[in-house]
Amino acid sequence: MQRQTITTDKAPAAIGTYSQAVRVGNEVYLSGQIPLVPETMLMVEGDIEVQITRVFDNLKAVAQAAGGDLSDVVKLNVFLTDLANFPVVNEVMARYFAQPYPARAAIGVAALPKDASVEMDAVLSICHSAE
């Protein structure tokens, strides 16, 4: 099966040896997104709700570049440096997803790149052809 690298300037550029996403067949594997503003590559300013929103916006931009959207997410991984922020993840996530919700894991971690408080990655299953 052919691999396709997905890139978009509507999400932060990769800051290491990885791609924003890779598509193989109907599946798209999105790399982790932290709350970076794509235009500046600086962390978004604001509370944890603003940061989580920025992460979902970044994931959405990469999903759209792959020919899908967040409704195609089948698996979402959430990494938090403070699990007390998990209710905010649920609150913000409800603005981006409708039932049936994707499978999800929430993991507490000691640290994230650029001292971020949240990072998320996802797997999409896109049943229509890429644009």
Image (cartoon, rainbow, N blue to C red):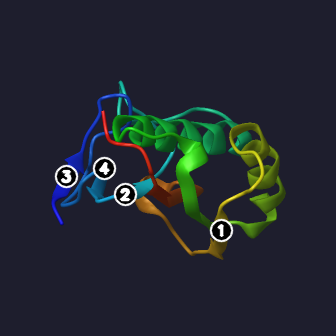
The correct choice, above or below, for 26 with respect to 59 in the image is: below
The correct choice, above or below, for 113 with respect to 127 in the image is: below
Seen from the viewer's position, the closer of residues 38 and 3 is 3
Quadrant position of residue 106: bottom right
Give the residue number, with chain letter if any, for mark 1. 104
**Dot placed on the residue nearer the N-terminal end, 3 or 1:** 3
On the picture, is 30 further left or further right than 51?
A: left
Q: Quadrant of the N terminus?
A: bottom left
Give the residue number, with chain letter if any, for mark 2. 26
- What residue sits 32% from the left and 40% below the top? 130
**Dot placed on the residue nearer the N-terminal end, 4 or 3:** 3
The correct choice, above or below, for 116 with respect to 48 in the image is: below
- What residue sits 53% from the left and 57% below the top? 119
In the rendering, at what x and y percent does residue 94 appear? 78, 44
Q: CA distance from mark 1 to mark 4?
A: 20 Å
Tell me the SS state at disc 4: loop
